[in-house]
Image (spheres, coloured by chain):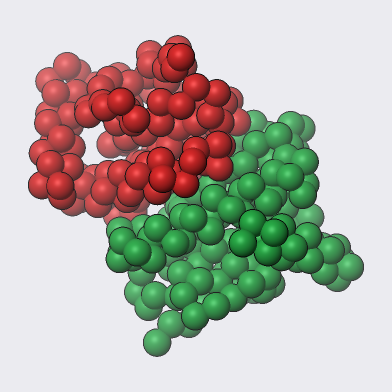
Chain colours: A green, B red
Amino acid sequence: MFVLNNTLEADSVPIVENADLLIRLINDARYPWILIVPTVPGASELHDLDEDLHTRTMSVARKCGQVLKQAFNADKINTAAIGNMVPQLHIHVVARHKGDTAWPGPIWGVGEMEPLTNDEIARRVELIREGLADLG
Amino acid sequence: MFVLNNTLEADSVPIVENADLLIRLINDARYPWILIVPTVPGASELHDLDEDLHTRTMSVARKCGQVLKQAFNADKINTAAIGNMVPQLHIHVVARHKGDTAWPGPIWGVGEMEPLTNDEIARRVELIREGLADLG
């Protein structure tokens, strides 16, 4: 049975979740940041997914990048499956802006997360949900 | 017309290259590290690729991860499209080992590259080429 990793769950809130994939917003004011988690028990690497779910997962990641770029006027999208600290397979999609805290370096392991207000969480979730719905 | 970015070219050697995708080895002794570059002029984001080439690109990335994990006995594969410094779209697939230079952090922006010997370049290229051929 699949159970979302405790750290991933504590750091994020749901945007769109279905049986195969969780799309969640990381609660961090520093970057508009989406987390995608395929609900496959024990999966740690992209190649632990079967080809069909891998394709669907990366298609969702591509759409999330497209939505973040437009909705948050990002300079660059960073998409990554790393998982050195949390082995449960998860894909980050992050809107980067020139001059953000970690720019031009990667965001992982840099500084501390800064919680969003509830209003800002709701605003980001709604923007992303609408953007994904528009893409179909 | 597509021209491989100068930095990407200087840092890597060909493994398998076809009309759509370049698969190259980064010349860095610290990590077994593959670079995948779709040959689309002006592409910077994954969503700059059409859906078909995106799917094929990520399918190749998935296979490269599978090959690196086995051939280099990796503890974790890191797969990422970042591009904050070099905007030409490129995907990194990196074999990570517990205790490597940057572990458990990401590798980008950490330390200096360490050139491989020519023999070790040839060995890595051959291992990866054979692994990809076996996967079909």
Q: Residue at x 50, y 67 (%)?
A: A37
Image quadrant occupied by the N terminus of chain A: bottom left
- The answer to whether residue B56 is seen in the rendering is yes
Q: Position of residue B45 (x, y in %)?
A: 56, 37
Q: Residue at x 46, y 69 (%)?
A: A38
Q: Is residue A47 above or below residue B35?
A: below
Answer left or right for B79 relative to A4. Answer: left
Q: Residue at x 46, y 75 (%)?
A: A20
Q: Position of residue B117 (x, y in %)?
A: 19, 18
Q: Position of residue A47 (x, y in %)?
A: 30, 58
Q: Position of residue B15 (x, y in %)?
A: 22, 27
Please tell me which residue lies in front, B64 or B103. Answer: B64
- The answer to whether residue A109 is seen in the rendering is no
Q: In the picture, residue A115 is in which quadrant?
A: bottom right
Answer left or right for A136 relative to B9. Answer: right
Q: In the picture, residue B48 is in which quadrant?
A: top right
Image quadrant occupied by the C terminus of chain A: bottom right
Answer left or right for A36 relative to B65. Answer: right
